[in-house]
Amino acid sequence: DRIVLVVGQDGQAIREHFSKMPYAEKISYVVQGEQKGTAHAIAVAADAVGDSPFIVCNADTFFEPSFYAKAAAMAKLGTPFVVGKRVDDASPYGLLQETEGRLQGVLEKPPEPGPGVIFTGCYFMKPDFFQYLARVGPSPRGELEVTDAIRAYSQDHTVRLYEHEGYWNDVGY
């Protein structure tokens, strides 16, 4: 129904780009004044999201275009989910731990290289997830990690793992 983009203080180029899109009227912008991590970026959007369930796709990750319709259809089922991708080396990412399709935990940037299903930065949550974001403390890297909030949320709620088999690319790596 609507799109909330979290931008930095210098987000004018992003605003200008999206102002030309046919769906521009559906976009609202939230400024993240200080970049404190992925959990903080989502937490600052709480007022804009309100009481609605929401899908997050990190801006530095790309899926094939048909993926987004699949994610929207899965969200209509109402059960929170994270999108994972099987990779040869999970060490630069959050390694998803699951049992029978249910998320059990997330190990942020495992110390040893190895294969696994990693967190793609795309997930669907209900509004009560913002309470878990508010409880996140700094990681050993000094950042507020959304994977910490997802880990805690998955202990109290059913969170499904959707293993994406199509195209996915993380521009940061």
Image (cartoon, grey):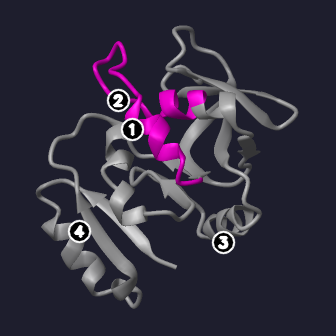
Viewer-proximal residue among 149 and 116: 149
Q: What residue type is labelled 1?
A: Ala
Which residue is the site of mark 1? 39
Q: What stretch is highlighted in magenta?
A: 126-152
Disc 2 is placed on an element classified as loop
Residue 21 appears in the picture as rendered: yes
Q: Say whether disc 1 or disc 4 marks the residue closer to the N-terminus.
A: 4
Give the residue at x 38% y 48%.
42
Of label 1 and label 2, which has the lower sequence position? 1
Mark 3 or mark 4: whose residue is earlier in sequence = 4
- Residue 14 is tagged as 4
Q: Earlier in the sequence, mark 4 or mark 2?
A: 4
Residue annotated with mark 2: 144
Name the kind of residue labelled 4 in the image.
Ile
Per the rendering, the mark at residue 52 is: none
Residues at badges 1 and 4 in contact (C-beta under 8 Å)?
Answer: no
Give the percent coordinates (x, y) of residue 25.
Answer: 34, 87
